[in-house]
Amino acid sequence: MAKAIEIHRLTKDYPHVRALDDVNLEVTSGECFGLLGPNGAGKTTMMKILLALISPTSGSVKIFNQPVRKEAVRERIGYLPEKVRIYGFLSGTEFLDYQGKLYGMNAQRRRVRVEECLQVVEMYEERFRKVGEYSKGMLQRIGLAQALLNQPELLFLDEPTVGLDPISNKEIRDVLLKLKEAGVTIFINSHLLSEVELMCDRVAILHRGHVVRIGTTQELATKSELIELRVEGITEVILSRLKEISHQLQSEGNHILLAPQNEHTIGSIPGIVINNGGTLLSLTTKRESLEDIFYTLIKEEEKLHE
Amino acid sequence: MNKVLAIALITIKEEVRNRVVYLLLGIAFFLLFLARGCASGKITMKKGILLSPEQLMTAGIVVTFNMILLWGLSLCGLLAMNTLSRELTEETIVLTVTKPIKRSYFLVGKFLGIFSMVFFNLMLVSIGFFLLLYFRSGVVKPSIFSGLLVASLNFISIISFIFLFSLFLPRVISGLLSLTIYILSLGLGVIFSFEKIRAYWEPSFSTQVLYYVLPQLGRVHLYACSLLSSIFPSSKGWWPVVDVVGYSFVVWLVMICIFQKKSL
């Protein structure tokens, strides 16, 4: 598969802090990629470098195999910033028409695309209202509309649904899911984990300028699978045998919670319990949500730094 | 080119809504109204001042034209110091520069927008002045417009300076610094242009250095005035114009280099 984004040994230093440290990342064409991280992790810096708003200290960034500063690259991308800042005196249509001119579209194409995009983001009825009178949700929609004007192959979204009401949130997410189905590569920068979990094929977790985990949401979840047992007649032998096949084990009363070393060890659990005099009442697997994984990882990283 | 014009047009639309423009325009027309006496040469003179009505009218024309230029300079400062700073602080620039457009085009578009606004307003006031002269005294003075065209070079230069300074200085300081350059250059230009002044005050070496280091905005200003009245010297011809063009070119080169690398 062709690479939409290639980040190689990317480092960005600010006067008193290293925002990104030797980051390597690849995003394949057509995938939806989520960049997660707490505040100050370096997400915005990475997004700004990808959009050529700032220059890296070292390393290289390519989009569609070309340097990010090339105009040809920006013809193929769309960008929705976290806070959509627009000239308030323009109407929705005027704003989109202006953005279309910046994409180099002719008048006829602009007219068609502006109408299409307004309808996609459900802002057609509000097209003649001044942008300055728009609510936060409307601004986000019109921002998304401008990002879609050029029918981008790669869409950068910076916290696309932050601060929106649940209905707007869902509607924008639905638009993005449709784009994903249409094969648009989406790069989302977010700390709304549920949103990323719902939309993204792959996720990178960024912390203090480092990528601490990268993979599909399933891969990350599998690595963090937990097994909950209800056992009658727990003995020391059962616990020590279970510890041998686990990363972590906790027991309280007749409950045992363990993190298996690999997915094949799950099958041996009933045998260990029964052969050592216990009665297995129930065995359930629990997958941690992305939020749990994220929280655990960040806490582990912070402990390491301490 | 269409992208540059789109940015220029948006800038004009933005400035058309700027109340300061209308306030300044109102003040300019009010002052023109007050100057109607000068235009007709009908001001009552104190005894002992020997000025003919023609001389008085020439003085009136020169003073009014200079007022128009200084008024234009204020307008330049107020519009230019806000436009780029506002784009940077309010981050409206982000959605523009992430489009397939060279960053330098953004600067050119903004510049064209501001210059068009300043020039349009100057033309309005100049037309007012031209009509006032014609209706009050029957004098037709088309050189007002040629003088304005020459002086426009200074406005181009000042807007460029303000834009350059706006990239790394607060907006008010950018504006004041650029206007200070203009006023200094104008003051030095007057000293170095009029022999009679130098007869009383010989400039020091440092003053001479400052005069030659600064852009020759003052000399261009005086050259524009010389098109209206022979009391202003234009003996050194076009070299101040070439100097200001050269300066503006360098300012633009530096500005583009800085802006290309600027973190947004």
Image: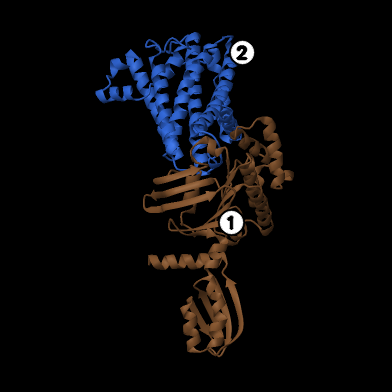
Residue B169 versus residue B247 in the image, above or below: below
Chain that is coloured brown in the picture: A
Q: At 39% from the left edge and 53% from the top edge, which residue is drawn?
A: A18
Identity, as a three-letter code, of the amino acid under mark 1: Asp
Label 1 vs label 2, nearer the camera? 1
The chain identifier of the residue carrying mark 1 reads A
Residue furthest to the left in view is B205
Front-lying residue, A19 or B18: A19
Q: Position of residue A217 (x, y in %)?
A: 56, 61
The chain identifier of the residue carrying mark 2 reads B
Which residue corresponds to mark 1? Answer: A201
Q: At 43% from the left edge and 38% from the top edge, which residue is drawn?
A: B261
Residue B201 versus residue A257 in the image, above or below: above
Chain that is coloured blue in the picture: B
Q: Are marks 1 and 2 in contact (CB under 8 Å)?
A: no
Residue furthest to the right in view is A125
Q: What is the secondary structure assignment of the residue under circle 2?
A: helix
Q: Is residue B237 left or right of residue B69?
A: left
The crowding category of the residue bearing disc 1, from other C-alpha atoms within 10 Å (few below 14, some 14 to 19, many at least 20), is some
Give how far apart the Cα atoms at labels 1 and 2 are: 77 Å
Give the number of callouts: 2
Identity, as a three-letter code, of the amino acid under mark 2: Phe
Q: Position of residue B31 (x, y in %)?
A: 55, 24
Q: At 59% from the left edge and 74% from the top edge, which residue is drawn?
A: A285
Q: Position of residue B60 (x, y in %)?
A: 50, 16
